[in-house]
Image: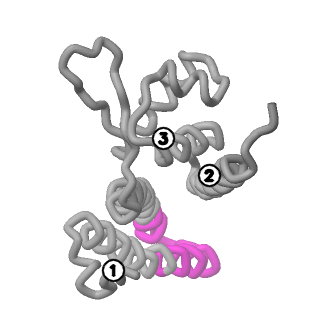
Amino acid sequence: MDENPEFAAIEQARDLVIDSIAETMDLYGITRSVGILYGTMYMRDEMTLDEMREELQMSKPSMSTGVKKLQDLNVVKKTFHRGIRKHTFVAEKDFFKFFTNFFPPKWEREVQVNVTAIEEAQADLQKVLCKEDLDEDIKNEALQLYDQLESSKAYYDWLKRLAESVQTGEIFKFIPVETK
């Protein structure tokens, strides 16, 4: 039996978008398979793990792990339906909400990890700089590194404020969403 060409075109369009979502998520550290899972869920109203497994030909444990990862990122929610035993899941379809859920925690982690390292490094450099009879070249190198680290703090302060403005929605006052 020949497949309806219009249906095939719709499926091809859907697959193209799913693939681009997966590729984009891969850029941000989410595995391609989890990106495909999100993209597939994005294209559907809601899905059970069995439906995901059947559509994507992946194992149920892989589906479960992928869904858990997406839930941890706050871009997939478990839904409840009275009288239905199987859990269903729904993907966030509003990319602005996705953005506000996905990126700020990553930025906050970047700030926390790097500022902690900078502060520890600067404390170590202070110990070097406090030594008597310190070689002038070593002193200059330590000062140069200390100053470089100090100047990088402005970026991390900015990134922290960016994360806060995205989480609170304040960023949309400065860059409003334009609907088309």
Say whether disc 3 or disc 2 marks the residue closer to the N-terminus.
2
Q: Secondary structure at mark 1?
A: loop
Determine which quarter of the picture holds residue 107: bottom left
In the picture, measured across the screen, residue 109 lies left or right of residue 43, that is left
Which residue appears farthest toward the front when viewing the image? 1
Magenta stretch secondary structure, dominant: helix
Nearer to me, 130 or 74: 74
Q: Is residue 77 above or below residue 157?
A: above
Nearer to us of marks 1 and 3 is 3
The residue at 50%/25% (across/down) is: 65
| Quadrant the C terminus occupies | bottom left
The residue at 32%/37% (across/down) is: 77
Residue 23 spot, x, y in % from top left: 66, 54
Say whether disc 2 or disc 1 marks the residue closer to the N-terminus.
2
- Kindly identify which residue carries mark 1: 177
Q: How many marks?
A: 3
Nearer to me, 169 or 132: 169
**Magenta region, residue range:** 124-147
- Kindly identify which residue carries mark 2: 14
In the picture, measured across the screen, residue 50 lies left or right of residue 8, that is left
The residue at 61%/29% (across/down) is: 55
Nearer to me, 157 or 31: 31
Amino acid type for the residue under numbered disc 3? Met
Residue 6 spot, x, y in % from top left: 69, 53
What is the CA distance from the residue labelled 2 to the residue labelled 1? 25 Å
The residue at 45%/31% (across/down) is: 67
In the picture, measured across the screen, residue 108 lies left or right of residue 56, that is left
Determine which quarter of the picture holds residue 111: bottom left
